[in-house]
Amino acid sequence: MADNNPPPEENQIVESSTTKDDTSLETIVRRFQESMSDSKTHKFWETQPVGQFKDIGDTSLPEGPIEPATPLSEVKQDPYNLPSVYEWTTCDMASDDICSEVYNLLRSNYVEDDENMFRFNYSKEFLSGVPARIRVRDEVVKMAEINFLCVHKKLRSKRLAPVMIKEVTRRVHLENIWQAAYTAGVVLPTPITTCQYWHRSLNPKKLIDVGFSRLGARMTMSRTIKLYKLPEALVTPGFRKMELLDVPAVTRLLRNYLSQFGVATDFDENDVEHWLLPREDVVDSYLVESPETHDVTDFCSFYTLPSTILGNPNYTTLKAAYSYYNVATQTSFLQLMNDALIVSKQKGFDVFNALDVMHNESFLKELKFGPGDGQLHYYLYNYRLRSALKPSELGLVLL
């Protein structure tokens, strides 16, 4: 059960108006298989209970768990063996010292772009987790959401990642959890959907200066800055920051909205409080409260994921907002997300990123988002879908 977020990527948003249209799962897998030699097949993943490439299109296979749960007494009780000089440590994330060690490992060794210009820099507040409930079609399944699989750069020739994946699987099984959800920027067996990242420039001069964006053809810096300029004032009456007392109303709004998607998070009030209640430098959530009825009618949220800027003499951090969960019922998606862009700009973000999941495509182009270079593939461990989803059928965003 491995996770690898897509790398921070070069952003080709200036004057972008189209994105790749040949991104069906079958096309991606075919191209991938054509590019692979026999020596590069996924020998590890072919041994795991995940959808296999050879089964794509076989509608006779049942949906649901690939392998049944087994009695906990039959789960391997001892950790998997590591090379002799290494040992397993269970990290107590409540300890400031250990949390700092994990943070520093990720800050120095986690996901980078292909040109080694940017590296994800998750804050310490992100480094915790709880089991999740994810609805797949009509079944609500308890899952682990897997993140932060990271091997120190000096140890990457030692084949530690498969052992880490098997060990985290064993530990999850001991909690009587048999499925997982994860994402990767690379194609593994077998995505349930493939999504595109889109980027909306908030600080175009900085993005161009650090190499995240390029100046468009026939564009000057001043014209580019003017192109992406946002209003100073919010547009939507009743738009305000989410508070603790809003949790029940936001939960009802989200549950109703997410019920339409093929795979989606199954939020209850505790989940909404944990994941979506605003926390500085972690998650921002806003809602629209009707001035007349005081009903909560709309909701938007984004999380903070900066990247370290490598080798630039003037800048050290790229502050990025990532679209999380958004629900528009009385306000148009365009207006709601335009207000989200305004508040993110006011909070000092350089770029606002969004996947083309849920109904996000309805606002991306008009709000001057442009497609990025990379794709994000979603996976389920030990759960088969007979057919892949469109990104717009996915109601799940993993941090």
Image (cartoon, rainbow, N blue to C red):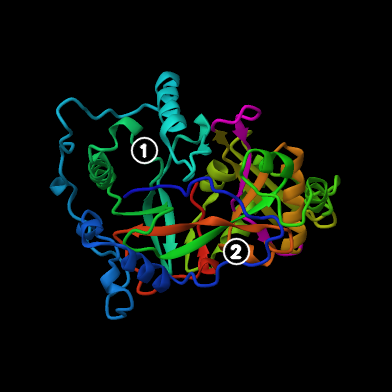
Depth check: 269 or 170 in front?
A: 170
The kind of secondary structure element at disc 1 is: loop
Query: x%, y% of residue 49?
Result: 24, 60
Question: What label does residue 257 carry, if any?
Answer: 2
Mark 2 or mark 1, earlier in chain: 1
Most frequent secondary structure within the magenta stretch: loop
Marks 2/1: CA distance?
Answer: 34 Å
Residue numbers of the magenta segment = 310-331
Quarter of the image holding residue 189? bottom left
Q: Mark 1 points at which residue?
A: 150
Q: In this view, does 71 lie to the left or right of 385?
A: left
Residue at 70%, 49% in the rendered image: 201
Label 2 neighbourhood size at 10 Å, few (<14), some (14-19), many (20+)? some
Q: Of the residues tagged 2 and 1, which is closer to the observer? A: 1
Q: Which numbered tag is attached to residue 258?
A: none
Q: Which amino acid does label 1 sit on?
A: Cys
Q: Residue 155 location, x and y as percent? A: 28, 33
- Residue depicted at x 44% and y 65%: 193
Query: Would residue 165 be counted in the magenta stretch?
Result: no
Let me know if residue 330 is in the magenta part. yes
Q: Can residue 97 be seen in this view?
A: yes
Q: Which of 35 and 54 is in front in this view?
A: 35
Q: Which residue is drawn at 66% across and 45% down?
A: 351
